[in-house]
Image (cartoon, rainbow, N blue to C red):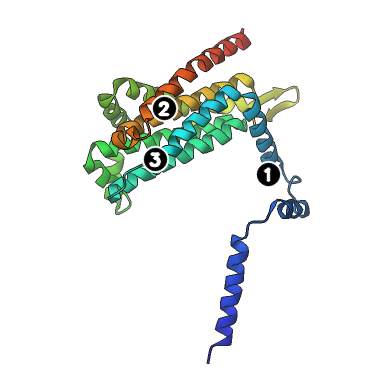
Amino acid sequence: MPNRKSAKKRRVKSRKEAEASYVPNEQELKTALEKSTWGKGELSQLLISSYNNIKISYVKAKPYVELFERITLSFAVSHNRISCSSYGELLHAAFFNRAFSNFVASARLMLSCQVTDSFSTLRSCLENGLYAFYTKSDSGLLTVYQNRHTSNEARKEMRRRFQVKDIFECLTSADSRLGQEARQLYNMCIDYGGHPNEWGSIPNIRTTDSGISMVILNADEQFVKGCFCAGIMIGKCVLSIFNLVYPEDFANVNMTLRIQHIEKHFKPVALSTAQMIRYLKS
């Protein structure tokens, strides 16, 4: 004879799981939001402002957005083309997926005008590319990386072997131009928000007669467009790094040609941005 209490618990659990996985339609969502504190609390107001900024930026910053789209497409078409027949290759695929995710997060932050915070995710995007290349260059490094959490000694060994200067030297030895570019972009991320440095903190502070005011969403034109350019350069750089990690897989999606197209279309955008910034500063 079936246990009624167990059956009831299963039904309650199934109903809760169904409720948790249910996605409301547009009208149901609108009604639910109207009944909530959405738009009234500080957080939701900031989220609404962020989303509105994204839509405005998407329309007004067309040349930059088109390059963001090109980079995102280059990541996307490669996503299911990566060989993955061992755990080591699985880790390299995970680095690629994180870099892709970081770039999308950065684009969302940049377009919303949450500029300084985007440099943290841009730095992470670059670091995932660098880790993928570094561990691909020496299988022993991949073993060190995998063993990181096994003991305190293993953790110290990883810190010793994964020094930033060593990673950049490894990349520079394979591609001098790319290694120098990656190092410059990494340092830029550190300066403008990847670390709590002055250049990443002061731009969001305003002095007034009554004291200071602080902003999270900074719509300063030269700062935002400068950040857009940084995001494009880092996205292109990371794709170039993974092009070394996956030469055969990426050849199937013409990655070298895709990167060249990004470079070609970025040059006039970078030039006009530099001219705009010089004009605003004069």
Q: Nearer the viewer, mark 1 or mark 2?
A: 2
Residue 27 appears left or right of 18: right
2 or 3: tag closer to the N-terminus? 3
Identity of the amino acid at label 3?
Phe
**Secondary-structure class at tag 1:** helix
User: Any mark on residue 43, and which?
Assistant: 1
Identity of the amino acid at label 1?
Leu
User: Any mark on residue 196, and which?
Assistant: none
The reply to whether the C-beta atoms of the residues labelled 1 and 2 are less than 8 Å apart is no
The reply to whether the C-beta atoms of the residues labelled 2 and 3 are less than 8 Å apart is no
Mark 2 sits on what residue?
258
Q: Nearer the viewer, mark 3 or mark 1?
A: 3
Examine the rendering and report whether any part of residue 218 can be seen: no
Mark 1 surroundings: few (<14), some (14-19) or many (≥20) residues within 10 A: few
Marker count (numbered): 3
Percent from the top left, x then y, of residue 137?
25, 36
Percent from the top left, x then y, of residue 123?
45, 33
Residue 156 appears left or right of 9: left
User: Any mark on residue 96, and which?
Assistant: 3
